[in-house]
Image (cartoon, rainbow, N blue to C red):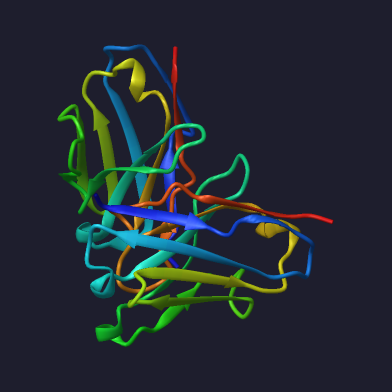
Amino acid sequence: EIVLTQSPGTLSLSPGERGTLSCRASQSVSSSYLAWYQQKPGQAPRLLIYGASSRATGIPDRFSGSGSGTDFTLTISRLEPEDFAVYYCQQYGTSPPVTFGQGTRLEIK
Amino acid sequence: EVQLVESGGGLVKPGGSLRLSCAASGFTFSNTWMNWVRQAPGTGLEWVGRIKSKTDGETTDYAAPVKGRFTISRDDSKNTLYLQMNSLKNEDTAVYYCTTSPRIWGQGTLVTVSS
């Protein structure tokens, strides 16, 4: 099973700042199958990035994904008030199990 | 409109059973591998299992905590995904989402296992 470890657990930033979230895998993940989600309280996860670096439909270009192998990054270039939420990475390759990171809480400083 | 709508959640006693449904629309359900993901209160996302499309054998895979107790099935004629949950435990309490993983997610249905 591929274990995904996200860091930091909590990130405190101000609107307008740049946010950098990390996702490290216990073994190599195909970039084709690495996703990032945003989740707000009481809502379902919202897909931001798939295939490590492709933005999902309707996602603002301030969100970008990068990385390969075991190290992946989600970058939010200029934080907007609505970006403060919990973020999860996920690997969804063809071999089970699908796994998620434990999440990074992005909070307003 | 692309949509997944779960139903069937509720309160059930430990050891009981429940069947969740997920109605799909707006995409070719029969060609799509489908997943169930759950989220216990205040915690992160946990994959429950998946079912492949009929053309890929309609085989199923499950996470270790639910293997042998949960069964995923699909009815392509009704564009509907199912999750049969037996021998429920308190720790199965969660919001259950159906998803094509990664693109499309339902709004979730709450299952509470409690005496």
Q: Nearer the viewer, residue A69 or B12?
A: B12
Number of on-image labels = 0
Residue drawn at x 29%, y 50% is A35
Task: Residue lying at the far right in this picture: please name it.
Answer: B115
Residue drawn at x 43%, y 69% is B81
Q: Identify the image quadrant of residue A77.
A: top left
List x then y, in percent, for residue B29.
28, 68
List x then y, in percent, for residue B66.
60, 71
In this rendering, does residue A102 appear at all? yes
Task: Residue lying at the far front in this picture: please name it.
Answer: B78
Q: Nearer the viewer, residue B57 or A36?
A: B57
Residue drawn at x 20%, y 35% is A59
Residue drawn at x 50%, y 32% is A41
Residue A109 falls left or right of residue A55: right
List x then y, in percent, for residue B110.
60, 50
In this rendering, does residue B100 appear at all? no
Above or below, B80 relative to A87: below
Q: Identify the image quadrant of residue A96.
A: bottom left
Residue B14 falls left or right of residue B46: right
Above or below, B85 relative to A31: below
